[in-house]
Structures are given as C-alpha cells and as structure tokens.
Image (cartoon, rainbow, N blue to C red):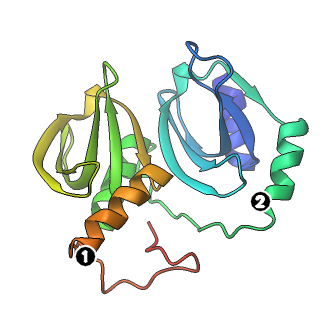
Amino acid sequence: MLQYITALSAAREPVCLYDDRETPAKFRFGKIMYANETELLLYEISRYGAFDGLSLLQTANVYRIEKNGQYQERMKILMQSNIFPEVHLDIQNGKIKHSFLRNLAASEKIVSVVLEGNETVTGMVERVDDTSLVMRQIDYYGCEDGQAAIALDTITGITCDSREERAIELLWRRKGNDGGTSHQAPNSTGRTPL
C-alpha cells in the first residue's frame, strides 16, 4: 500500500481515503501531499467541494483508497466553484510530523492533536523539539485553557484548518487575541497562509 500512497502523493490527485476500520462507510477526500512509511499529510476537501484543512494520519491505518469513481466526478464539479489555498510546507529529512508541527508553530494556527487512546488536545503549537511539543490550549469557546506538553511519539493525528479549528480560531480572535499574526497578509481566501 505504501508504494501506491507514495505514487498518489507525487500525482496530487484527489482520492477517497479510508482509515477508520470501525466505521467502514466513513472516508476522507483529498490530495495526499506527503507520505512516508509512518505518516501522510492529507489536504482535505469537504463533501461540498471546499478546502477542509490538513490532516496528518498514520499510513498503517489506511486500508482502502479509491480514485476515478463517481464520487470524484461529483467532487470535481463542486470544487470548481471554490478557491483553494496553496500550502507550502518545509518537510525536512522526510519527517512529516515533526516538520508539520514546526510549520504550525510558526503559523500560530489552531490545531487539534490526537493522542493514543483518542484523546484530543486543541490549541496553538508554541514549541517543538526532537521528542515533545508544548501547546497553548484553547477550548471549544475560544478561551485559553493552560498549557500542555506532549510526547511526539504519542501523537496519532493532527488536524489544522478544518471547520472545527477555524471556528475555534474565530472565537479566539474575537476575544482580542490576534496571536501576533496581525502583521501577516491574508491570502485570497482571507486566511493567513501556513
């Protein structure tokens, strides 16, 4: 499966990706941006054809991929009416997770980090080193909720810029927290680029 995933990453063509065996009817749709033997980064597209964030997933959890079907044809039509932000990440030495987290720390975006046991920590990545990260936790209502230090090897997934994170970020910013990004110019979608 890894060779197939790697080829799709190079082609950047939209696919349906299944990674939840407990809910086999559930899938993600998007373009695989980067992949290695342990993780992949997916540029997600919602079922309405709009950008729905970036997700870091475990490669081993992917058990089915579909392309060139009716769903992809439907999505091509829906995607035509949307603007998609360009994403440029500096992936160093093939370390997707570590590089993604460093990019997120620099962007000051709201992210959701999924840990072993399906625990989720939401907030802003403040620092990343070789073994851990420190996050400023932001709750569902956009309020600061302390700090969390997390071991990198316990992270099973990361999501950034999905509807959930964008909603929390909006609430956070409305409370007068500009996160220091007010000096950056937004892109064509009105969002500060990653």
The amino acid pointed to by label 1 is: Asp
Residue located beneath label 2 in the image: 79
Residue located beneath label 1 in the image: 178
Residue positioned 84% across, 54% down in the render: 76
The answer to whether one can see residue 162 in this image is no
Distance from disc 2 to disc 1, alpha carbons, whole Å, reads 31 Å
Element class at badge 2: helix
* Front in this rendered view, residue 90 or 160: 160
Element class at badge 1: loop
Residue positioned 56% across, 20% down in the render: 20
- Relative to 101, say whether 59 is above or below: above
Residue positioned 25% across, 51% down in the render: 123
Q: Which mark is residue 168?
A: none
Query: Local crowd at mark 1 within 10 Å, few (<14), some, or many (≥20)?
Result: some
- Relative to 163, say whether 25 is above or below: above
Q: Position of residue 90 (x, y in %)?
A: 44, 59
The answer to whether one can see residue 13 in this image is yes
- Relative to 183, say whether 68 is above or below: above
Query: Extreme top residue here?
Result: 22
Q: Left or right of 34: which side holds 147?
A: left
* Front in this rendered view, residue 20 or 33: 20
First along the sequence among labels 2 and 1: 2
Query: Local crowd at mark 2 within 10 Å, few (<14), some, or many (≥20)?
Result: some
Q: Left or right of 173: which side holds 91?
A: right
Q: Position of residue 23 (x, y in %)?
A: 59, 17
* Front in this rendered view, residue 6 or 70: 70
Q: Position of residue 164 (x, y in %)?
A: 43, 50
Q: How many marks?
A: 2
Quadrant of the frame with the N terminus:
top right
Quadrant of the frame with the C terminus:
bottom left
The amino acid pointed to by label 2 is: Met
